[in-house]
Image (cartoon, grey):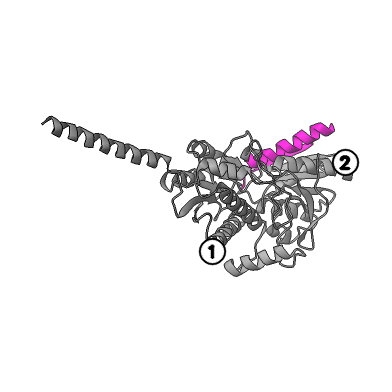
Protein backbone atom coordinates (compact mmCIF):
# COMPACT_ATOMS: atom_id res chain seq x y z
CA UNK A 1 0.00 0.00 0.00
CA UNK A 2 2.74 2.42 1.02
CA UNK A 3 4.69 1.53 -2.14
CA UNK A 4 1.62 2.25 -4.25
CA UNK A 5 1.13 5.65 -2.59
CA UNK A 6 4.82 6.47 -2.98
CA UNK A 7 4.74 5.48 -6.65
CA UNK A 8 1.65 7.66 -7.16
CA UNK A 9 3.33 10.61 -5.55
CA UNK A 10 6.41 10.07 -7.72
CA UNK A 11 4.35 10.07 -10.93
CA UNK A 12 2.41 13.10 -9.76
CA UNK A 13 5.65 15.00 -9.15
CA UNK A 14 6.98 13.99 -12.55
CA UNK A 15 3.77 15.11 -14.23
CA UNK A 16 3.95 18.43 -12.41
CA UNK A 17 7.52 18.88 -13.58
CA UNK A 18 6.50 18.23 -17.18
CA UNK A 19 3.64 20.72 -16.92
CA UNK A 20 5.97 23.30 -15.40
CA UNK A 21 8.52 22.73 -18.14
CA UNK A 22 5.86 23.14 -20.82
CA UNK A 23 4.59 26.30 -19.16
CA UNK A 24 8.12 27.68 -18.92
CA UNK A 25 8.72 26.92 -22.59
CA UNK A 26 5.47 28.61 -23.55
CA UNK A 27 6.35 31.67 -21.49
CA UNK A 28 9.76 31.82 -23.13
CA UNK A 29 8.25 31.66 -26.63
CA UNK A 30 8.91 34.93 -28.42
CA UNK A 31 5.69 36.51 -29.64
CA UNK A 32 5.28 36.43 -33.41
CA UNK A 33 8.12 33.95 -33.87
CA UNK A 34 7.96 30.23 -34.66
CA UNK A 35 10.55 27.83 -36.00
CA UNK A 36 9.50 28.72 -39.54
CA UNK A 37 8.00 32.22 -39.41
CA UNK A 38 8.43 35.81 -38.23
CA UNK A 39 5.17 37.74 -38.06
CA UNK A 40 5.42 41.51 -38.58
CA UNK A 41 2.71 44.15 -38.60
CA UNK A 42 2.16 47.46 -40.36
CA UNK A 43 -0.59 50.03 -39.89
CA UNK A 44 -0.60 52.62 -42.63
CA UNK A 45 -2.77 54.84 -44.79
CA UNK A 46 -4.16 52.96 -47.78
CA UNK A 47 -7.28 55.08 -48.29
CA UNK A 48 -6.88 58.53 -46.70
CA UNK A 49 -5.03 61.78 -47.27
CA UNK A 50 -1.64 60.06 -47.00
CA UNK A 51 -2.45 57.05 -49.18
CA UNK A 52 0.09 58.08 -51.82
CA UNK A 53 2.73 57.30 -49.20
CA UNK A 54 1.06 54.39 -47.45
CA UNK A 55 0.33 52.34 -50.55
CA UNK A 56 3.79 52.74 -52.06
CA UNK A 57 5.51 52.23 -48.72
CA UNK A 58 3.63 49.01 -47.94
CA UNK A 59 4.27 47.77 -51.49
CA UNK A 60 8.01 48.25 -51.10
CA UNK A 61 8.08 46.63 -47.66
CA UNK A 62 6.26 43.59 -49.08
CA UNK A 63 8.61 43.47 -52.06
CA UNK A 64 11.75 43.50 -49.91
CA UNK A 65 10.37 40.82 -47.57
CA UNK A 66 9.31 38.70 -50.55
CA UNK A 67 12.84 38.93 -51.90
CA UNK A 68 14.26 37.86 -48.54
CA UNK A 69 11.83 34.93 -48.40
CA UNK A 70 12.61 33.90 -51.98
CA UNK A 71 16.29 33.84 -51.05
CA UNK A 72 15.58 31.25 -48.35
CA UNK A 73 14.33 33.42 -45.53
CA UNK A 74 16.24 34.63 -42.51
CA UNK A 75 18.03 32.04 -40.43
CA UNK A 76 15.50 29.43 -41.54
CA UNK A 77 12.39 31.58 -41.08
CA UNK A 78 10.14 33.33 -43.59
CA UNK A 79 8.67 36.78 -42.91
CA UNK A 80 4.90 37.18 -42.97
CA UNK A 81 3.56 40.74 -43.03
CA UNK A 82 0.08 41.83 -41.95
CA UNK A 83 -0.93 45.28 -43.23
CA UNK A 84 -3.85 47.20 -41.72
CA UNK A 85 -5.40 50.32 -43.26
CA UNK A 86 -5.85 53.16 -40.74
CA UNK A 87 -6.74 55.85 -43.32
CA UNK A 88 -4.53 58.40 -41.52
CA UNK A 89 -7.08 58.55 -38.70
CA UNK A 90 -6.15 58.09 -35.05
CA UNK A 91 -9.21 56.01 -34.01
CA UNK A 92 -8.67 53.61 -36.89
CA UNK A 93 -4.96 53.42 -36.07
CA UNK A 94 -5.72 52.47 -32.48
CA UNK A 95 -8.06 49.71 -33.69
CA UNK A 96 -5.42 48.44 -36.11
CA UNK A 97 -2.74 48.46 -33.43
CA UNK A 98 -4.94 46.57 -30.97
CA UNK A 99 -5.58 43.89 -33.59
CA UNK A 100 -1.93 43.53 -34.52
CA UNK A 101 -0.81 43.43 -30.88
CA UNK A 102 -3.53 41.38 -29.20
CA UNK A 103 -5.05 39.20 -31.91
CA UNK A 104 -2.22 38.70 -34.40
CA UNK A 105 0.52 38.97 -31.75
CA UNK A 106 3.10 40.33 -34.16
CA UNK A 107 6.79 40.43 -33.32
CA UNK A 108 7.26 44.07 -34.40
CA UNK A 109 5.73 46.97 -36.32
CA UNK A 110 7.48 48.08 -39.51
CA UNK A 111 6.97 51.47 -41.20
CA UNK A 112 3.80 52.39 -39.28
CA UNK A 113 2.48 55.63 -40.81
CA UNK A 114 1.78 59.03 -39.28
CA UNK A 115 2.99 60.97 -36.26
CA UNK A 116 -0.34 61.12 -34.37
CA UNK A 117 -1.13 57.49 -35.26
CA UNK A 118 2.19 56.19 -33.92
CA UNK A 119 1.86 58.30 -30.80
CA UNK A 120 -1.63 56.95 -30.16
CA UNK A 121 -0.36 53.37 -30.34
CA UNK A 122 2.86 53.69 -28.36
CA UNK A 123 1.47 53.09 -24.86
CA UNK A 124 -0.08 49.69 -25.60
CA UNK A 125 2.54 48.74 -28.16
CA UNK A 126 5.55 49.35 -25.95
CA UNK A 127 3.81 47.80 -22.93
CA UNK A 128 3.43 44.63 -25.01
CA UNK A 129 7.13 44.89 -25.97
CA UNK A 130 6.48 45.25 -29.69
CA UNK A 131 9.34 47.18 -31.36
CA UNK A 132 8.51 50.16 -33.59
CA UNK A 133 10.80 49.98 -36.61
CA UNK A 134 11.40 52.92 -38.94
CA UNK A 135 7.94 54.55 -38.97
CA UNK A 136 6.71 56.55 -41.94
CA UNK A 137 7.10 59.86 -40.14
CA UNK A 138 10.14 61.90 -39.17
CA UNK A 139 8.84 63.11 -35.82
CA UNK A 140 11.35 63.31 -33.00
CA UNK A 141 8.88 61.35 -30.91
CA UNK A 142 9.74 58.26 -32.96
CA UNK A 143 13.10 58.10 -31.17
CA UNK A 144 12.81 60.58 -28.28
CA UNK A 145 12.76 60.07 -25.40
CA UNK A 146 15.03 57.07 -25.69
CA UNK A 147 13.30 53.71 -25.66
CA UNK A 148 15.05 50.49 -26.57
CA UNK A 149 12.14 49.43 -28.81
CA UNK A 150 12.09 52.58 -30.97
CA UNK A 151 14.26 52.77 -34.10
CA UNK A 152 14.30 55.53 -36.73
CA UNK A 153 16.57 56.15 -39.70
CA UNK A 154 16.77 59.81 -40.75
CA UNK A 155 16.68 63.50 -39.86
CA UNK A 156 13.61 64.60 -37.92
CA UNK A 157 11.08 67.11 -39.24
CA UNK A 158 12.20 69.43 -36.47
CA UNK A 159 15.82 69.39 -37.65
CA UNK A 160 14.86 69.55 -41.34
CA UNK A 161 12.91 72.76 -40.83
CA UNK A 162 15.63 74.26 -38.66
CA UNK A 163 18.06 73.64 -41.52
CA UNK A 164 15.64 75.23 -44.00
CA UNK A 165 15.14 78.37 -41.89
CA UNK A 166 18.88 78.68 -41.36
CA UNK A 167 19.60 78.38 -45.09
CA UNK A 168 16.92 80.78 -46.35
CA UNK A 169 17.64 83.45 -43.75
CA UNK A 170 21.42 83.32 -44.03
CA UNK A 171 21.87 82.46 -47.70
CA UNK A 172 18.75 84.00 -49.29
CA UNK A 173 18.25 86.98 -47.00
CA UNK A 174 14.70 86.09 -45.92
CA UNK A 175 13.37 88.31 -43.15
CA UNK A 176 9.65 87.59 -42.75
CA UNK A 177 9.40 83.92 -41.84
CA UNK A 178 5.93 82.35 -41.56
CA UNK A 179 4.44 78.87 -41.09
CA UNK A 180 1.42 77.06 -42.56
CA UNK A 181 0.83 73.77 -40.78
CA UNK A 182 -1.58 70.94 -40.16
CA UNK A 183 -3.15 71.11 -36.72
CA UNK A 184 -1.63 67.72 -35.85
CA UNK A 185 1.40 66.43 -33.92
CA UNK A 186 3.31 66.48 -37.21
CA UNK A 187 2.34 70.06 -38.07
CA UNK A 188 3.16 71.31 -34.60
CA UNK A 189 6.64 69.82 -34.85
CA UNK A 190 7.21 71.91 -37.99
CA UNK A 191 6.01 75.00 -36.11
CA UNK A 192 8.28 74.13 -33.18
CA UNK A 193 11.30 73.73 -35.46
CA UNK A 194 10.64 77.07 -37.17
CA UNK A 195 10.18 78.88 -33.85
CA UNK A 196 13.32 77.31 -32.37
CA UNK A 197 15.57 78.26 -35.28
CA UNK A 198 14.05 81.73 -35.60
CA UNK A 199 14.82 82.35 -31.94
CA UNK A 200 18.39 81.14 -32.45
CA UNK A 201 18.78 83.60 -35.33
CA UNK A 202 17.30 86.44 -33.29
CA UNK A 203 14.15 86.87 -35.36
CA UNK A 204 10.46 86.20 -34.74
CA UNK A 205 7.91 84.36 -36.81
CA UNK A 206 5.70 86.92 -38.52
CA UNK A 207 2.58 84.76 -38.89
CA UNK A 208 1.32 81.18 -38.64
CA UNK A 209 -1.86 79.49 -39.85
CA UNK A 210 -3.22 76.05 -38.99
CA UNK A 211 -5.59 73.80 -40.90
CA UNK A 212 -7.09 70.32 -40.80
CA UNK A 213 -5.41 67.60 -42.92
CA UNK A 214 -8.64 67.24 -44.91
CA UNK A 215 -9.08 70.96 -45.74
CA UNK A 216 -9.24 71.76 -49.46
CA UNK A 217 -9.74 75.53 -49.66
CA UNK A 218 -6.70 77.58 -48.64
CA UNK A 219 -7.67 80.98 -49.98
CA UNK A 220 -8.18 82.49 -46.53
CA UNK A 221 -4.89 81.33 -44.94
CA UNK A 222 -2.88 82.25 -48.04
CA UNK A 223 -4.47 85.71 -48.01
CA UNK A 224 -3.62 86.07 -44.33
CA UNK A 225 0.01 85.11 -44.87
CA UNK A 226 0.32 87.44 -47.85
CA UNK A 227 -1.12 90.37 -45.92
CA UNK A 228 1.39 89.67 -43.16
CA UNK A 229 4.20 90.28 -45.64
CA UNK A 230 5.75 86.82 -45.44
CA UNK A 231 8.71 86.20 -47.74
CA UNK A 232 9.24 82.59 -46.57
CA UNK A 233 6.51 80.08 -45.69
CA UNK A 234 7.49 76.85 -43.95
CA UNK A 235 4.97 74.12 -44.77
CA UNK A 236 3.86 71.63 -42.13
CA UNK A 237 1.90 69.85 -44.86
CA UNK A 238 1.99 66.58 -46.80
CA UNK A 239 0.76 66.18 -50.40
CA UNK A 240 -2.61 67.70 -51.25
CA UNK A 241 -2.33 70.42 -48.61
CA UNK A 242 1.05 71.36 -50.10
CA UNK A 243 -0.11 71.52 -53.70
CA UNK A 244 -3.34 73.49 -53.28
CA UNK A 245 -1.92 76.35 -51.14
CA UNK A 246 1.13 76.81 -53.36
CA UNK A 247 -0.90 76.84 -56.58
CA UNK A 248 -3.44 79.14 -54.93
CA UNK A 249 -0.70 81.61 -53.98
CA UNK A 250 0.76 81.67 -57.46
CA UNK A 251 -2.67 82.11 -59.07
CA UNK A 252 -3.24 85.06 -56.75
CA UNK A 253 -0.07 86.62 -58.13
CA UNK A 254 1.91 86.16 -54.93
CA UNK A 255 5.35 85.42 -56.33
CA UNK A 256 7.78 87.28 -54.04
CA UNK A 257 7.72 84.48 -51.49
CA UNK A 258 9.31 81.03 -51.22
CA UNK A 259 7.50 77.97 -49.90
CA UNK A 260 9.50 75.10 -48.39
CA UNK A 261 8.23 71.86 -46.91
CA UNK A 262 9.72 69.03 -44.92
CA UNK A 263 10.53 65.60 -46.33
CA UNK A 264 6.80 64.85 -46.02
CA UNK A 265 6.24 67.09 -49.08
CA UNK A 266 9.22 65.70 -51.01
CA UNK A 267 7.11 63.41 -53.14
CA UNK A 268 6.91 62.78 -56.88
CA UNK A 269 3.17 63.58 -56.85
CA UNK A 270 3.95 67.05 -55.47
CA UNK A 271 6.75 67.57 -57.97
CA UNK A 272 4.70 66.46 -60.96
CA UNK A 273 1.57 68.45 -60.07
CA UNK A 274 0.80 71.31 -62.43
CA UNK A 275 2.07 74.68 -61.25
CA UNK A 276 4.53 73.39 -58.61
CA UNK A 277 7.77 74.61 -60.18
CA UNK A 278 9.73 76.67 -57.68
CA UNK A 279 8.42 74.81 -54.63
CA UNK A 280 11.11 73.65 -52.18
CA UNK A 281 11.35 70.73 -49.77
CA UNK A 282 13.92 69.02 -47.59
CA UNK A 283 15.02 65.65 -48.97
CA UNK A 284 16.55 62.59 -47.34
CA UNK A 285 17.39 60.46 -50.40
CA UNK A 286 17.42 60.75 -54.17
CA UNK A 287 14.00 60.58 -55.85
CA UNK A 288 13.30 57.19 -57.54
CA UNK A 289 13.08 58.33 -61.15
CA UNK A 290 13.21 55.68 -63.85
CA UNK A 291 16.00 57.56 -65.65
CA UNK A 292 18.06 58.11 -62.50
CA UNK A 293 21.82 58.27 -63.13
CA UNK A 294 22.20 55.78 -60.26
CA UNK A 295 22.02 52.18 -61.61
CA UNK A 296 20.70 50.72 -58.34
CA UNK A 297 17.81 53.18 -58.33
CA UNK A 298 16.91 52.40 -61.96
CA UNK A 299 16.96 48.68 -61.16
CA UNK A 300 14.74 49.22 -58.11
CA UNK A 301 12.23 51.18 -60.20
CA UNK A 302 12.12 48.36 -62.76
CA UNK A 303 11.50 45.69 -60.11
CA UNK A 304 8.84 47.75 -58.36
CA UNK A 305 6.99 48.61 -61.57
CA UNK A 306 7.11 45.00 -62.76
CA UNK A 307 5.59 43.80 -59.48
CA UNK A 308 2.96 46.52 -58.94
CA UNK A 309 2.45 47.99 -62.44
CA UNK A 310 3.04 51.54 -61.19
CA UNK A 311 6.05 53.79 -60.73
CA UNK A 312 7.41 54.04 -57.16
CA UNK A 313 7.40 57.33 -55.27
CA UNK A 314 9.46 58.42 -52.30
CA UNK A 315 7.21 56.39 -49.99
CA UNK A 316 8.49 53.28 -51.75
CA UNK A 317 12.04 54.40 -51.04
CA UNK A 318 11.33 54.72 -47.33
CA UNK A 319 9.52 51.38 -47.34
CA UNK A 320 12.44 49.61 -48.97
CA UNK A 321 14.98 51.10 -46.57
CA UNK A 322 12.81 50.24 -43.54
CA UNK A 323 12.37 46.64 -44.68
CA UNK A 324 16.03 46.27 -45.64
CA UNK A 325 17.19 47.48 -42.21
CA UNK A 326 14.69 45.15 -40.55
CA UNK A 327 16.02 42.20 -42.55
CA UNK A 328 19.57 43.12 -41.56
CA UNK A 329 18.63 43.36 -37.88
CA UNK A 330 16.90 39.96 -38.02
CA UNK A 331 19.95 38.40 -39.69
CA UNK A 332 22.22 39.89 -37.04
CA UNK A 333 19.99 38.42 -34.31
CA UNK A 334 20.95 34.89 -35.34
CA UNK A 335 18.85 31.71 -35.40
CA UNK A 336 17.81 32.03 -31.72
CA UNK A 337 15.49 34.97 -32.38
CA UNK A 338 14.25 36.68 -29.23
CA UNK A 339 13.38 40.29 -28.50
CA UNK A 340 16.75 40.80 -26.82
CA UNK A 341 18.75 39.17 -29.61
CA UNK A 342 16.90 41.30 -32.16
CA UNK A 343 17.62 44.53 -30.26
CA UNK A 344 21.30 43.58 -30.19
CA UNK A 345 21.09 42.78 -33.90
CA UNK A 346 19.70 46.24 -34.64
CA UNK A 347 22.31 47.92 -32.45
CA UNK A 348 25.02 46.09 -34.40
CA UNK A 349 24.15 47.91 -37.64
CA UNK A 350 27.06 50.22 -38.53
CA UNK A 351 27.97 52.03 -41.74
CA UNK A 352 24.73 51.09 -43.50
CA UNK A 353 24.23 52.73 -46.92
CA UNK A 354 20.93 52.37 -48.75
CA UNK A 355 20.71 52.18 -52.55
CA UNK A 356 19.20 55.68 -52.84
CA UNK A 357 22.25 57.70 -51.72
CA UNK A 358 20.78 58.43 -48.31
CA UNK A 359 22.98 59.30 -45.35
CA UNK A 360 25.07 56.56 -43.74
CA UNK A 361 23.25 54.96 -40.81
CA UNK A 362 24.67 53.79 -37.51
CA UNK A 363 22.91 52.41 -34.45
CA UNK A 364 24.12 51.42 -31.00
CA UNK A 365 23.07 50.68 -27.41
CA UNK A 366 22.12 54.34 -26.90
CA UNK A 367 21.59 55.32 -30.56
CA UNK A 368 18.11 54.98 -32.05
CA UNK A 369 18.32 57.59 -34.84
CA UNK A 370 20.44 56.14 -37.62
CA UNK A 371 21.24 59.40 -39.45
CA UNK A 372 20.51 63.11 -39.20
CA UNK A 373 21.08 65.07 -42.39
CA UNK A 374 18.82 66.52 -45.08
CA UNK A 375 19.31 68.57 -48.24
CA UNK A 376 17.24 71.20 -50.06
CA UNK A 377 15.46 70.19 -53.27
CA UNK A 378 13.41 72.26 -55.72
CA UNK A 379 10.75 71.40 -58.28
CA UNK A 380 12.06 72.20 -61.75
CA UNK A 381 10.22 71.11 -64.88
CA UNK A 382 7.91 68.87 -62.89
CA UNK A 383 10.79 66.99 -61.22
CA UNK A 384 12.63 67.28 -57.95
CA UNK A 385 16.19 68.55 -58.30
CA UNK A 386 18.68 68.57 -55.45
CA UNK A 387 20.09 72.07 -54.99
CA UNK A 388 22.31 71.82 -51.89
CA UNK A 389 24.59 69.49 -50.01
CA UNK A 390 23.39 68.32 -46.56
CA UNK A 391 22.42 71.34 -44.49
CA UNK A 392 22.89 72.10 -40.82
CA UNK A 393 21.80 74.77 -38.38
Magenta span covers which residues? Answer: 185-213
Query: Quadrant location of residue 366?
Result: top right
Which of pointers 2 and 1 indicates the residue nearer the eye? 1
Left or right: residue 90 versus residue 198 is left
Residue 64 higher or lower than 197, as above or below: below
Q: Which residue is mark 1?
A: 70
Residue 378 covered by magenta stretch: no
Residue 208 covered by magenta stretch: yes
Q: Is residue 219 visible?
A: yes
Residue found at the far left of this picture: 1
The residue depicted at 84 percent of the width and 44 percent of the height is 168
Front residue of 116 and 64:
64
Q: Position of residue 23 (x, y in %)?
A: 35, 39
**What separation in Å lies between label 2 and label 1 (alpha carbons)?**
51 Å
Q: Position of residue 184 (x, y in %)?
A: 62, 41
Front residue of 289 and 198:
289
> Label 1 near label 2: C-beta < 8 Å?
no
Q: Which residue is mark 2?
A: 170
Q: Earlier in the sequence, mark 2 or mark 1?
A: 1
Amino acid sequence: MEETIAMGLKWAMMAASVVAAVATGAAAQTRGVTKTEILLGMHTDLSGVGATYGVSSSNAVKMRFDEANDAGGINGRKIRLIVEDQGYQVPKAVQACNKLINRDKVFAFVQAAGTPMNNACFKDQLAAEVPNLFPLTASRMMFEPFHRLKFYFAASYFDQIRSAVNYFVKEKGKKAVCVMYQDTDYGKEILDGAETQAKKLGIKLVEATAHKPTDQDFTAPITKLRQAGCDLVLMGTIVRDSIIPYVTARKMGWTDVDFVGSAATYDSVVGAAQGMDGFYAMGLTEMPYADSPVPAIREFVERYKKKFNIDPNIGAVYGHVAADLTVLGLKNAGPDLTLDSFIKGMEAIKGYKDIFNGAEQNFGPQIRQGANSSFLAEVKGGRWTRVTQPLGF
